[in-house]
Image (tube, grey):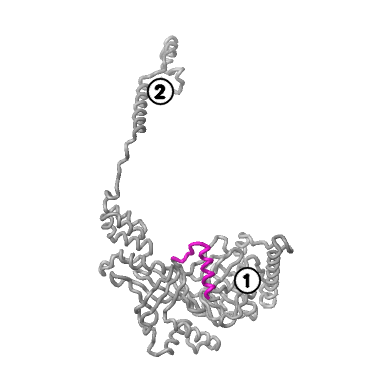
Amino acid sequence: MAVCARLCGVGSSRGCRRRQQRRGPAETAAADSEPDTDLEEERIEAGAAALCGEWGGRSASPSPPPRCSLLELPPELLVEIFASLPGTDLPSLAQVCTKFCRILHNDTIWRRRCREEYGVCENLRKLEITGVSCRDVYAKLLHRYRHILGLWQPDIGPYGGLLNVVVDGLFIIGWMYLPPHDPHVDDPMRFKPLFRVHLMERKSATVECMYGHRGPHNGHIQIVKKDEFSTKCNQTEHHRMSGGRQEEFRTWLREEWGRTLEDIFHEHMQELILMKFIYTSQYDNCLTYRRIYLPPSHPDDLIKPGLFKGTYGSHGLEIVMLSFHGKHARATKITGDPNIPAGQQTVEIDLMHRIQLPDVENLCNFNELSRIVLEVHEQVRQEQQQQEDRTEDGEGAGPPTAKVREPRHEEAAALQEQPVPFVLPVGVSSRNENYPRTCRMCFYGTGLIAGHGFTSPERTPGVFILFDEDRFGFIWLELKSFSLYSRVQATFRNADAPSPQAFEEMLKNIQSLTS
């Protein structure tokens, strides 16, 4: 009756309306006095009770699930599983049993590890012709030399450099990145190979020196520690040219500067070029490299940090690294010169002191720009002095410092959308006259200048000019000089710092080497 009541939409005490309509009043009254049961309802309840009893029995004494061992899986499935594991875990897996060891000899596993961990895109099946397996490539080449992959700075005195060690096909190659020829700062970077590592046979990897013009020859790589390694050429006679040092210098000058010595009329510039050739050629590609990281980025950064190439007067183009540190930004030299060596902080930008440039007519007047910058310079000096006084006298003592409002991000975005005209003041020299004629914003900054040999270094006031996402400039007031910087458009693997602290430590290390 309960089932019928649910179907008909009435309660169990009222009974079925259809039955009541067919019955008379007496029958209806008698039916209402009977228990509300139904054969179908009893059958459903009995079935439910039986199921409950069956489930209850299972919960009381559950049967153990069937066991399945990895050894029982088909080999093709094990190959797929093992190929998804890190290559460093596979040797331990091979020691579990003979079956695992036999399966791990399948080159499909190691081919996938080479591709996913090191980006090897070559057709590794061709290795079968040479008798070298993908397992050999992984173990004897890629894994063995994994610690030298990434960005490095060679120890070449004040000149430094930028080395990028990458997996290139079935080779590991160290590419030296060189700025474009002066003064074309917007041109792409140049690069040349210094060494390469590859498997010539199954026994071990072969290191070859690529320096010079007589092809690859015998070399050596020694991994000193995690973030340092050295290279050595065992056949330096391959670096010599038949025409002697004079021919070597002419060839180097054509590659380094894209011109001959007769094309360079500035006597001081000729001396600097000759000095660099004599200094750098004595190393014969026997160098020590120290790891460098790309700067970490943050959504609130003024622009994306990274590597830039910039003009430095008679020294030509050099590579700097722009990084952000709270209220300041810094440009650190990756390549350098005898005045300001590699590793030093060439420019520092105070993001708390923005400079409002005058209109174009007044901007052409160097004295007007100098007056504006020196006023901000004096303000910064007073704030620093007040901060030092408060530190010496204790917190809360001394005169209160002027509250400096940090620019909000929406204001910065608005300024970026509204570029203003920009021209260099009359009397300010620039290696590149093809600089942008509009800028987004300007900040007070200081630039590092020094005498030859990094003597009497001092920071002098200047103006940081942001042109766009990929270009910025700096006006050195004391030198009456302008440097234009353009972003290095390249993708670097294995170059991210493991933490912000590791990046800061790296900056301190490369600066201490030349201090």
The dominant secondary structure in magenta is: helix
Residue at position x 46%, y 17% in the image: 14
Q: Where is residue 240 in the image (x, y as percent from the top left)?
A: 39, 86
Q: Is residue 505 magenta?
A: yes
Residue at position x 36%, y 56% in the image: 85
* Front residue of 9 and 201: 201
Please tell me whether residue 283 is drawn above or below residue 5 in the rendered image: below
**As shown in the figure, which amino acid type bears the numbered disc 1?**
Gly
Question: Which element is circle 1 on?
Answer: strand
Q: Which stretch is magenta?
A: 494-513
User: Is 51 situated left or right of 189 in this image?
Assistant: left
Question: Which element is circle 2 on?
Answer: helix
Q: Rate crowding at label 2 as few (under 14), some (14 to 19) or many (20 or more) other CA atoms within 10 Å.
A: some
Identify the disc placed on residue 445: 1
Q: Where is residue 230 in the image (x, y as percent from the top left)?
A: 42, 74
Tell me which label, 1 or 2, sits earlier in the chain.
2
Residue furthest toward the right? 399
User: Is 84 situated left or right of 308 in this image?
Assistant: left
Residue contact at pointers 1 and 2, CB within 8 angstroms = no
Q: Where is residue 480 in the image (x, y as percent from the top left)?
A: 63, 79
Quadrant occupied by the N terminus = top left
Hey, which quadrant is residue 133 in on the image? Answer: bottom left
Residue at position x 31%, y 55% in the image: 80
Total marks shown come to 2
Quadrant occupied by the C terminus = bottom right
- Labels 1, 2: front one: 1
Residue furthest toward the top? 26
Residue 141 visible, this orientation: yes
Q: Rate crowding at label 1 as few (under 14), some (14 to 19) or many (20 or more) other CA atoms within 10 Å.
A: many
Instruction: Give the residue pinned by disc 2.
Output: 3
Q: Where is residue 372 in the image (x, y as percent from the top left)?
A: 69, 72
**As shown in the figure, which amino acid type bears the numbered disc 2?**
Val
